[in-house]
Image (cartoon, rainbow, N blue to C red):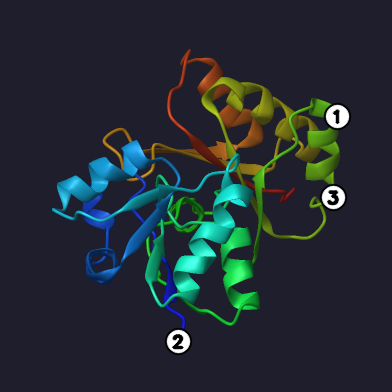
């Protein structure tokens, strides 16, 4: 009988956000597949958990996949985690989950920390429908085209952005959606300097222009409403 693949969310900043169920699974599993073994070791040590770790990230996942699947087929319990948040959301994990399902291996996803949902519910933008885009295209022309595709859907657009690109990205949102579009920048979610910068596209742009360098990873939320 095959084992079980557990998809285990980990905190995105505040260690109190790990669930009791996640801790139990991590303590009971035979192997933990993680994005960065050094980062994961810090988390596990904090909670007094000692388990074998195997790295599973974007550049080695094809190589690691057979090894982990064989462990599962041998009846072992494997927990998949990322450096923070829910695995496979713009992080490695999708191909492992798909392969496990294709092989008939039991797959058990756990609810937990997720930057997208946390940012969305705190944004004060409509939550009845949203589009998550992960990381947008790097080149401005392609990014502009990608954003324009969602302009008339009447849903909140959510994507990740790095701090050194945030100013140009907000400028592009202003260009694509206009001054009256509503924007929220969620920065350093669950961490000490957590911040939500809300307003029209113009207001948010002027806000971050006046503040110099902004650190931390961003979740950008845009509602292209002209009213």
Q: Residue at x 65, y 35 (%)?
A: 201
Locate residue 29: give its quadrant: bottom left
N-term-proximal mark, 3 vs 2: 2
Q: Quadrant of residue 109?
A: bottom left
User: Is 69 situated above or below 132?
Assistant: below
Of residue 85 and residue 23, the one placed in the foreground of this image is 23
The residue wearing badge 3 is 149
| Disc 1 element | helix
Q: CA distance from mark 1 to mark 2?
A: 51 Å
Q: Residue at the bottom extreme?
A: 1
- Packing grade of label 1 (10 A; few <14, some 14-19, many >=20) is few
> 162 above or below 47?
above
Residue 128 showing in the rendered view: no
Name the spot of residue 187 as percent of width and height, x first: 44, 36
**Location of mark 1 (residue):** 141
Disc 3 on helix, strand or loop?
loop
Residue 60, position as x, y percentages in the image:
58, 43
Depth check, front residue: 115 or 103:
103
* Left or right of residue 60: residue 42: left
Can residue 38 be spotted in the picture? yes
| Picture disc at residue 25 | none
Give how far across and how far down residue 1 sits, in percent: 45, 87
| Badge 3 density bin: few <14, some 14–19, many ≥20, Cα 10 Å | few
Q: Are marks 1 and 2 in contact (CB under 8 Å)?
A: no
| Local SS, label 2 | loop
Q: Residues within 10 Å of mark 2 (few under 14, many from 20)?
A: few
| Rendered view: 58 above or below 28 | above
Residue drawn where x is 79% and y is 27% of the image: 139
Give the left or right position of residue 192, taking residue 194 as reference.
Answer: left
Q: Check disc 2 and report the residue beneath it.
A: 1
Disc 1 or 3, which lies upstream in sequence?
1
């Amino acid at each position: 009988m095959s084992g079980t693949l557990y998809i285990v969310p980990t905190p995105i900043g505040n260690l109190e956000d790990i669930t009791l169920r996640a801790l139990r699974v991590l303590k009971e599993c035979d192997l933990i597949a993680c994005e960065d073994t050094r980062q994961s070791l810090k988390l596990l040590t904090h909670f007094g958990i000692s388990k074998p770790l195997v790295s599973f990230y974007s550049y080695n996942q094809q190589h690691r996949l057979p090894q982990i699947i064989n462990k599962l087929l041998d009846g072992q319990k494997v927990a998949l985690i990322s450096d923070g948040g829910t695995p496979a959301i713009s992080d490695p994990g999708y191909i492992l989950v798909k392969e496990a399902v294709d092989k008939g291996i039991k797959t058990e996803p756990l609810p937990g920390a997720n930057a997208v949902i946390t940012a969305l519910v705190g944004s004060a933008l409509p939550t009845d429908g949203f589009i998550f885009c992960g990381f947008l295209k790097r080149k401005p022309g392609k990014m502009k085209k990608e954003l324009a595709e969602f302009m008339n859907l009447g849903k909140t657009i959510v994507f990740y952005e790095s701090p050194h690109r945030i100013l140009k990205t907000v400028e592009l949102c202003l260009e694509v959606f206009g001054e009256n579009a509503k924007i929220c920048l969620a920065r350093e979610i669950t961490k000490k300097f957590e911040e939500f910068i809300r307003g029209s596209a113009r207001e948010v742009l002027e806000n971050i222009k006046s503040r110099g360098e902004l650190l931390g990873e961003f979740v950008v939320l845009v509602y292209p409403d002209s009213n």
